[in-house]
Image (cartoon, helix red, strand yellow):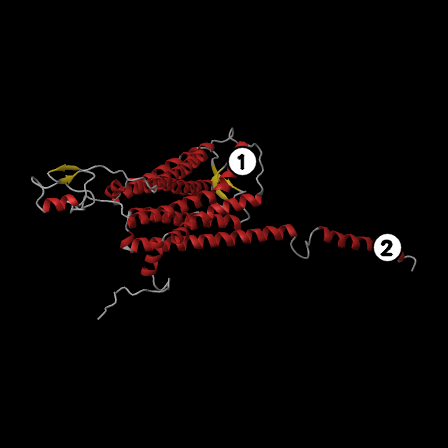
Amino acid sequence: MRGRAPPAGPTAPPMANSSSGGGDDGGADGGPSPLQSYASAASAVKLASLALITGVSLLGNASLSLLLLKDSALHKAPYFFLLDLCVADALRSAVCFPFVMVSVGGGSAWPYGALSCKALAFLSVLFCFHVAFLLLCVSVTRYMAIAHHRFYHKRMNVCTCAAVVCMAWTLSAAMAFPPVFDVGTYKFVREEEQCTFEHRHVKANDTLGFLLMLAAVVGATHAVYVKMLCFVYDHRKMKPAQLVPAVSQNWTFHGPGATGQAAANWIAGFGRGPTPPTLVGIRQAAAHPANRRLLVLDEFKTEKRIGRMYYMITLAFLLLWAPYIGACYLRIFVRGAAVPPPYLTAAVWLSFAQAGANPIISLLFNKELRLRLRACFPCCCPGSRTPTEPYCVI
């Protein structure tokens, strides 16, 4: 019994050490650690949210594109530009977002080569700049439609719209293509979990010019809308009437201040000589009705409604990209600046959400699109229908 007692003492401490070691390992034998659980939950949230953004973007842009192509009443200049926006956002969602989901599912790593990453980054930057340049061109056309409606009606045809769209694609390709030849500019950024610009300090990288160009394009777009708003406000002011006296030749009053009494005097025989000139306030049949184009009240309301829709699209583009652009400027101007990972992830995902925002904004702020959607797809958009034929009263 005395020989067996000493071995029993040393065996107890190892058991205590093993139990305490199991608690320090954070569940190495019993389950994952809290840090691993948090990373898994964050990856699941990222994948679910990005899948939702991708699905909404593809469904919304495809439906709106089909509506714009199917309905002949929407074959107009503003909706041609909206069709191009839908196509660009749908391509971005279909081409770029699945690779981001693959990198998130693979533990924030890029499983493919450097060449494919550079090509994907080129496409991402191309789609971003294309939306910015096209919104700038659309703002100019909106101003022309309000301020110079006659010129806009004559010149904005299908060929002009195609030329504007091609110009926007060319400018965006010119902005996105040069970094392909720079070493290390396009690469996989682990913090953003995507292939894009590698934003470093201004002395170590040259991406500042691209961000400044993007900011300048967005700022110029808002400046055009401000000018259009000032034009509309200025022309809504009521100005006092200026009475101009009429000119009388044998009781035939004519001139800027003439009224209908001049025509009555001439018909009654008080006037002698040729027929008086065209009187103010009396509309005569135009010699060339096809060349006469005036912006009436209904057309003005339509143009203003379309302009409001495009401005909300431009504002959404600015608001959804602003957090990410702000983080990029911080990393460029502040050396060694550490952006909080939750903020950077939210900023990147907001820039992804911009691809699915345009169809929602278009349907919310354009009554014509909603009506045409109900007319073309009555099964998808049920609602109260009014009879298309007038009532017959006997």
Q: Residues within 10 Å of mark 1 (few under 14, many from 20)?
A: some
Look at 68% across and 56% down and name the residue there.
29
Look at 51% across and 42% down and name the residue there.
323
* Measured Cα–Cα span from mark 2 to mark 1: 62 Å
Say whether residue 232 is left or right of residue 23: left
Residue type at mark 1 is Leu
- In which quarter of the view is residue 384 placed? bottom left
Residue type at mark 2 is Gly
Q: Position of residue 32 (x, y in %)?
A: 64, 54
Residue 286, above or below 385: above
Q: Residues within 10 Å of mark 2 (few under 14, many from 20)?
A: few
Determine which residue is flagged by label 2. 9
Say whether residue 53 is left or right of residue 384: right
Q: Position of residue 120 (x, y in %)?
A: 43, 43
- In which quarter of the view is residue 140 placed? top left
Which residue in the rendered view is the most extreme toward the bottom?
Answer: 394
* Mark 2 / mark 1, whichever is N-terminal: 2
Q: Position of residue 245 (x, y in %)?
A: 21, 37
Total numbered circles = 2
Front-lying residue, 210 or 17 = 210
Which residue in the rendered view is the most extreme toward the right?
Answer: 2
Determine which residue is flagged by label 1. 330
